[in-house]
Amino acid sequence: MRRSIALLVLLMLTVALAGAQPAQTFTAGGVTYTVDKYVTANYPVKLAFAPDGRLFYTEKNTGSVRVVSADGVLQPEPVITLPVDGLAERGMLGIALDPDYAENGHIWVVHTTPGTVRDYPANQLVRFTEENGVGRDPEVMFSVPLEGRSLIHNGGHVAFDREGRLYLTVGDYENPANAQNLDVIPGKIHRFDVTDAGLVPAADNPFEGSSVYAYGLRNPWDFDFDLDGTGIFATENGDHCDDEINRILRGFHYGHGADYRCGGTAAGVDMTYYVAPLLSFTPTEAPTGILVYHHDAAPDWIGKLFFCVWNDGYPSLRMITLDDDRRAVESVTEVPLGEARCRIDIAQGPDGGLYMSSVDSDGGAIWRLVPQ
């Protein structure tokens, strides 16, 4: 009996080792790094690290926010679960931890509410307070009803700058005219001050009384702040041409809704405030997550932009080197990942590693790239 048990244990160990996926080693931009699977996940979308090293991520279709401990163990139960409409690009989308998270436990998420017979779904920004691994006391802080039966161009990225102001991306809801109309919410990046009474347009926004920070955007999927904390770099999903990497400037627009993109014209639109992209891609590749690297684990990468690509057939992670003024691209380098992919989001971990969310035929995973 003991011999049978020992043989069974040996067989199980052999199978486990045979199925294990050892880390692969690569080099890009003067940095050698390993890539391995950090955790298997159910359609992971956005990633956010807590000060204690835990990784929070959203699950698009389940409406859940899951947590991975600092040593890589998935918490059995979600910290948050909300009802969602997960059709197409809807679902549980963005997540950000409050700048004072260590004191107040606030988690901010963006999700698409289920619709009813009479009411269309809405993209909502909701704030929770985490207590002992559970999100409590949800408060709807901002809501943008979907127009008609739009399934795509939701945006959904939420982030805080160093001054504690909140930024939120909203796609054009499949209506290009929204992007140039300063009186509507879709097609913009918005900026708010967080007050005891809720969200209010930031006091120094470019348009008085408006939350609009930048406009003329089709589907601004993600952005990150530059090393100085002020500049912003964003990915933009184009139409049949011209996906973009943009440098976002306060009060300027980025061409969508002006018939300017793809070599068109801009009749009736003041192009004085138009900003051309840092990069554009034709045919479309669908750039998604973007990150400005800022960790001593890879000194040669500091200040580089990393961005992910959704579409198959293209390198899924690339690195941009900018000029000294941070206004022009000097080079674009493929970052090899082996069998891993960066299809949705990318976040820098406390260890200086790059953590990347992806989906595939098996469901999804979060991959980890660690400089050596």
Image (cartoon, rainbow, N blue to C red):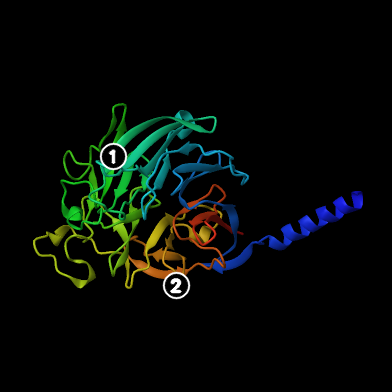
Q: Amino acid at mark 2?
A: Gly
Q: Which residue is located at x 25 percent, y 41 percent?
A: 119
Find residue 372 and report its image quarter: bottom right
- Assign a secondary structure to mark 1: strand
Q: In the rendered structure, are the residues bearing label 1 and label 2 in contact, judged by CB atoms less than 8 Å apart? A: no
From this viewpoint, which residue is outermost toward the left?
Answer: 268
In front of the other: 76 or 117: 117
Q: Which residue is located at x 16 percent, y 48 percent?
A: 182
To which residue does mark 1 refer? 143
Which of the marked residues, 1 or 2, is nearer the chain's N terminus?
A: 1
Q: Report x, y in % for residue 19.
A: 69, 61
To which residue does mark 2 refer? 313
Q: Is residue 164 at all visible to an observer of this figure?
A: no
Image position of 3 (left or right of 148): right
Q: Report x, y in % for residue 64.
A: 47, 42
Q: Amino acid at mark 1?
A: Ser
Find residue 281 and report its image quarter: bottom left
- Assign a secondary structure to mark 2: loop
Q: Report x, y in % for residue 319.
A: 45, 64
Mark number, residue 57: none
In front of the other: 122 or 117: 117
Q: Tally the numbered discs.
A: 2
Q: Is residue 206 at all visible to an observer of this figure?
A: yes
Q: Report x, y in % for residue 10.
A: 82, 56
Mark 1 residue crowding within 10 angstroms, few (<14) / some (14–19) / many (20+): some
In front of the other: 203 or 258: 258
How far, Cα to Cα, is label 1 from label 2? 36 Å
From this viewpoint, which residue is outermost toward the front?
Answer: 117
